Image (cartoon, grey):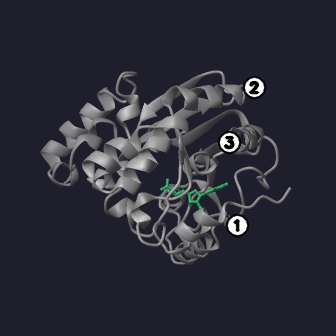
Amino acid sequence: MGYEIDSAIQEHYGIGVERDRLTTWGRLEAVRTGELLDRFLPEPPAVVLDIGGAEGAYALPLAAAGYEVHLIDPVERHVDAARAASATAPAPLASASVGDARALPQADGSADAVLLLGPLYHLVEAADRATALAEARRVLRPGGVLLAAAISRFASALDGGVRAGYFGDPRFAAIVDRDLTDGVHRNPDPAGRPEWFTLAYFHHPYGLRDEVVAAGFPEVQVLAVEGIGAAGDTGPLLDDPGTREVLLGTIRRLESEPTLLGASPHLIAVAVASG
Ligand SMILES: C[S@@+](CC[C@H](N)C(=O)[O-])C[C@H]1O[C@@H](n2cnc3c(N)ncnc32)[C@H](O)[C@@H]1O
């Protein structure tokens, strides 16, 4: 079945917002996601599907670490950039192709790990998220690992409204009102304010866990990615080796504290496919 993503999402990523995100304002997200991949992925060599892998920010380092990595993304610009980077990388991707999390080309039980670091928050219909999770479950071998990212229901209020100061614009206050009501995030001015993100679904942490369980993964851990790091500017703390370890150690210590989960802009659900 051919799936298409919403044109608002295509246009948002078509302007190249993913190129530098994880090395600039998304640096803590990248460091912490890298830590979680190190902790939960099976040892290389193993087959990893990076679904919604954009330009390969995680896929390329994983290929360099010895994994067989297949990247799939619905945005052609992302796949072209991933292929170009792969062509000159020390270890290339096994494949990079345009596709959708709801209809994976891989055979049943063929992957050791599936990364859904993006698709779940761009599928606003619950049925579409269920389809993407069912596809991840189908292609994983028994014992294979799923890492699925979500954006917190409260991210736009905390991170956008307060930290970035967007509450100064009544249009952003209206976005947050909608996010808090039903989780569906829409940007009314995508050309003027691309930093307000695009069409997305923001999960309650327990909602993320419930969706992954419903897809046939009985044991699910939901972990904060940035966690308490979202409370301030972590750039200087990450730059200093002493404070970096204090910061990351404290985030790790609190990563599954239920009363703090929703304060983390990103969450990752980790689950193992049963036999
Ligand atoms: C914010 S980016 C995240 C990229 C990267 N995985 C990361 O974690 O930094 C979200 C990604 O999800 C992709 N995406 C959106 N809808 C998707 C879908 N239905 N299936 C697969 N990927 C999708 C987008 O094209 C984009 O590359």
Which residue bears the numbered disc 2?
275
Ligand 1 is found in the corner quadrant, namely bottom right
Q: Position of residue 179 (x, y in %)?
A: 48, 42
- Marks 3, 2: nearer the viewer: 3
Q: Amino acid at mark 3?
A: Arg
Q: Residues within 10 Å of mark 2 (few under 14, many from 20)?
A: few
Q: Amino acid at mark 2?
A: Gly
Q: Residues within 10 Å of mark 3 (few under 14, many from 20)?
A: many
Q: Quadrant of residue 91?
A: bottom right
Task: Farthest residue to the right: give it.
Answer: 1
What's the CA distance linking mark 1 and mark 2?
A: 30 Å
Disc with the residue nearer the chain's start (3 vs 1): 1
251 left or right, relative to 85: left
Q: Position of residue 123 (x, y in %)?
A: 64, 48
- The local secondary structure at tag 1 comes to strand
Q: Is residue 152 visible?
A: no
Q: Residues within 10 Å of mark 1 (few under 14, many from 20)?
A: some
Q: Quadrant of residue 128?
A: top right
- The local secondary structure at tag 3 comes to helix
Which residue bears the numbered disc 1?
98
Q: Is residue 126 visible?
A: yes
Q: Nearer the viewer, residue 233 or 156?
A: 156
66 left or right, relative to 192: right
Task: Farthest residue to the front: give it.
Answer: 170
* CB at disc 1 and ligand 1 closer than 8 Å: no
At x 72%, y 37%, the residue is: 137
At x 37%, y 38%, the residue is: 264
At x 41%, y 66%, the residue is: 193
Q: How many marks?
A: 3
- Marks 1, 2: nearer the viewer: 1
Where residue 129 is drawn, which disc sits there?
Answer: 3
- The local secondary structure at tag 2 comes to loop
